[in-house]
Image (cartoon, helix red, strand yellow):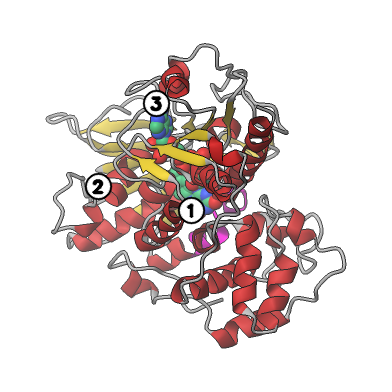
Amino acid sequence: MPKELNAQLRSEGFDEVCSVYSEEEALLEASRCIQCKDPACISGCPVGIDIKKFISQIVDKDYKGAYFTIREKNNFPAMCGRVCPAEYQCRKVCVFTKKGSPFASDKAINIHFLERFVADFGIDNGLDISAEKDKKLKAYKVAVVGSGPAGLCCAGELARKGIKVVLFEALHKSGGVLRYGIPPFRLPQEILDFEIGNLKKLGVEIECNIIIGKTKSLNELFDEGFKAVFLGLGAGVPSFLGIPGENLCNIYSANEFLTRVNLMGAYKFPQYHTPINVGKHVVVIGGGNTAMDAARVALRLQKLHNIPADVTVFYRRTENEMPARRLEILHAKEEGIKFEFLVQPVEFKGDNENSFVSKIRSLRCELGEPDDSGRRRPVAIKGSEFEVDCDEAIIAVGLKANQVLIQVTPELKIDKWSDIIVDPITMQTSIKSVYAGGDVVGGEGTVIEAMGMAKKASAAIEEYLLKQ
Ligand code: FAD
């Protein structure tokens, strides 16, 4: 593990928690890789980084070479090195993880930390790539809608080929969840700005404050001369519990809460006065990365506002089933977040005067048969009701596809979850020159999975343009 800020100290602010490996640490970690003949880690990476090669370049102290090996497949190594859930991806299939394990063993090579080491070396040494402009492709213009990892990745891949790319973003800043969801103590905004800056250097034009489907339609994009469109709309519509009292004041969706803090600057209090409630007894409901981020942010806000720390996560299964990154769960515990496992909220109660939430009533659960996701279903235990004080609740129980564009484009076929239906090889939608990828296609996923889909789409768009 690279060095980390002390738990007490870091939970008092929003500084980055994990440091980068020192050269010595990186060399030691890289030297543990046995350079497998048939390395599974590469296929475990949704964008197919040549992990074996970049690790051997680290061993040879060829950090520049390692940087360019990663950039061949990934334009955003500094972001991915910080947020990739490697324990479910490349590290899970590392030879040092026992086959069939639900997540990577501690012995698996820390590929993500090595990626970050190389990426930060690249930043410190001003390394960058230039576009290999294809003469024919230079004539075309492609629109990318949404600037999350899917949109950014697709834009980067196309720009590298010399295609003129304009990226449209509804919010006032680009980055999608990387900007408004993931807090700066996990992904500093400067890192995001730096890697988005590299994209601009490749020629990508970014237009914020434009909602495709409202400010302008998909058809208007074609009228403006765009030959193809990629939709990386993401999944930002929160799911709720559907229980009594859920509309009481001081109950937030995690997305709204995190957006106010990260994008709207509430974490910079007192410099910024973005309205945000800071409860004395905060309960976060959910077990994914969003829940961990919301809980850790809520704790930091309490400390910033001199309120004694009291944040509890309610999750209806056990820790083993939690989808959050293992490191985030560990960090949350170290920082003093409490966990109540096998708990299902059934009602929010309000103070009768002002309609503010004051208590949460819940049932204890036990695990039953596996559900469609393969995880054992929580079953409520009769008569196990209990109540706790709660003057702020943050609900992080899932997200659905952003609908603005979908609703005004009936030709765009969607499935029963309202995700866009695509050809799994080309990512082409039901509209010929429109492609899609990321969370708007597969539902809530990961940064690198969104990028994997975007890469498939960009390859198909290139092929489509070359046939014009
Ligand atoms: P998004 O990142 O959601 O971006 C979509 C963008 O499209 C948004 O900026 C939106 O404003 C814009 N948009 C939508 N509609 C329109 C329109 N009509 N016109 C213009 N713009 C539009 N994954 C990890 O791998 N590691 C993590 O640690 C991790 N932590 C997470 C923490 C949180 C709080 C959340 C919510 C998710 C986390 N994830 C994590 C998941 C990951 O962030 C997502 O899978 C990923 O961001 C999806 O990328 P995307 O490009 O599809 O969508």
Picture residue at 40% right of the left edge, 44% below the top: 205
Who comes first in sequence, dot 3 or dot 1? 1
Whole-percent x, y for residue 383 in the image:
48, 33
Numbered disc 3: secondary structure: loop
Find the distance from the CA under tag 3 to the CA under tag 2.
22 Å
Which residue corresponds to the image point at 44% horizontal and 16% vertical from the top-left? 407
Mark 2: which secondary structure? loop
| Residue for point 58% across, 35% down | 437
Q: Is residue 240 left or right of residue 128?
A: left
The three-letter code of the residue at mark 3 reads Ile
Residue 131 sits above or below residue 213 on the image: below
Inspect this view and state whether residue 24 appears: yes
Quadrant of residue 391 within the rendered picture: top left
Three-letter amino acid code at the position of disc 2: Met
Which is more N-terminal, label 2 or label 1? Answer: 1
Tag 3 residue: 212
Residue 244 horizontal/vertical position (percent): 35, 24
- Residue at x 56% of width, y 59% of height: 326
- Check disc 2 and report the residue beneath it: 264
Residue extending farthest top: 410
Query: Mark 1 belongs to which amino acid?
Result: Leu
Magenta-colored stretch includes residue 329: yes
Task: Give the number of callouts.
Answer: 3
Q: Mark 1 vs ligand 1: CB under 8 Å?
A: no
Packing grade of label 1 (10 A; few <14, some 14-19, many >=20) is many
Q: Main secondary structure of the magenta part?
A: helix
Range drawn in magenta? 319-330
Towards the viewer: 72 or 392? 72
Q: In the drawing, what numbered circle is on residue 202?
A: 1
Q: Is residue 290 visible?
A: no
- Between marks 1 and 2, how big is the CA–CA gap? 28 Å
The quarter of the image holding the C terminus is: top right
